[in-house]
Image (tube, rainbow, N blue to C red):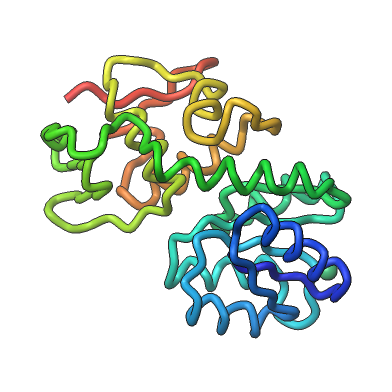
């Protein structure tokens, strides 16, 4: 994993804890360095401090998303900043507020890393046919999505949400259930994080929430696939 933090003591402390927990950890002290290191290392997880000198965490996250689907855990100094960052739609997967205990941090990293090993709604090599919703095809095993034959580039979190909905297309999933399945049962946070990620998925698959062709909003509940 890559630890991006401009306070050297904190950066080293975090990297040491993560190394002890069994994760190879590298440090970047600035946003520019973070982007260069991420290109070289191709990390599974980037722990990204929001407040960096120069290129800040939001911009780093935005640029990371142009070349990697690694998990991005955004670290903020104030919990009320989280809503603002979520609103910016830069594609972070989870958020953690300073100060955090090393144990909490390790738990969060473990939680996100468990996700790709447990693809939502899919068993490895299950032989399951891709699910079709009109011209939208969701390949649960291959973790691929195409629309009208064109590949759709989703982040892991976005794919996991779409895969969950597509795996049981008749089921209306509550926001809470989506959080439990896609994030982690221990995830504590605002349920509207789900809405933001669904909005990203809709934008990428060209779905109009006012006239949905793929993902329906179930008022007061959450989301369900549109019946073909
Ligand atoms: Ca900082």
Q: Residue at x 50, y 60 (%)?
A: 44
Quadrant for the C terminus in the image: top left
Q: Is residue 165 above or below residue 12?
A: above
Asked whether residue 57 appears in the rendered view, the answer is yes
Asked if residue 62 lies left or right of residue 163, the reply is: right
x then y, percent, for residue 33: 65, 84
Q: Quadrant of ligand 1?
A: bottom right
Q: Classify residue 34 by image quadrant.
A: bottom right
x then y, percent, for residue 177: 51, 21
Nearer to the camera, 134 or 30: 30
Asked if residue 13 lies left or right of residue 131, the reply is: right
Asked whether residue 212 appears in the rendered view, the answer is no
Q: Residue at x 32, y 29 (%)?
A: 121
x then y, percent, for residue 110: 59, 44
| Mark count | 0
Q: Residue at x 83, y 45 (%)?
A: 80
Asked if residue 198 lies left or right of residue 106, the reply is: left
Asked if residue 150 lies left or right of residue 44, the reply is: left
Q: Is residue 125 above or below residue 29?
A: above
Q: Residue at x 73, y 65 (%)?
A: 15
Q: Classify residue 1 by image quadrant.
A: bottom right
x then y, percent, for residue 191: 62, 29
Q: Classify residue 131 by image quadrant.
A: top left
């Amino acid at each position: 994993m890559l630890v991006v933090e401009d306070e050297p003591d904190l950066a080293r402390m975090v990297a040491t804890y993560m190394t002890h927990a069994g994760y190879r950890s590298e440090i970047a002290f600035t946003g520019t360095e973070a982007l260069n290191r991420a290109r070289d290392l191709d990390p599974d997880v980037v722990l990204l401090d929001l407040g960096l000198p120069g290129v800040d965490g939001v911009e780093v996250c935005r640029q990371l998303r142009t070349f990697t689907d690694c998990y991005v855990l955004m670290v903020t100094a104030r919990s009320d900043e989280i809503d603002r960052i979520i609103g910016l739609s830069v594609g972070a997967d989870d958020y953690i507020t300073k100060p955090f205990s090393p144990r909490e941090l390790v738990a969060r990293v473990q939680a996100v890393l468990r996700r790709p090993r447990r693809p939502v709604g899919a068993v490895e090599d299950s032989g399951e046919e891709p699910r079709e919703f009109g011209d939208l095809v969701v390949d649960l095993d291959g973790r691929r999505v195409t629309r009208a034959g064109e590949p759709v580039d989703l982040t892991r979190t976005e794919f996991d949400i779409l895969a969950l909905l597509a795996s049981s297309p008749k089921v209306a999933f509550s926001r809470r259930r989506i959080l439990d399945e896609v994030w982690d049962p221990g995830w504590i946070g605002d349920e509207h994080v789900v809405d933001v990620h669904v909005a990203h998925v809709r934008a990428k698959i060209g779905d109009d929430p006012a006239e949905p062709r793929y993902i329906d909003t179930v008022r007061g509940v959450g989301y369900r696939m549109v019946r073909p």
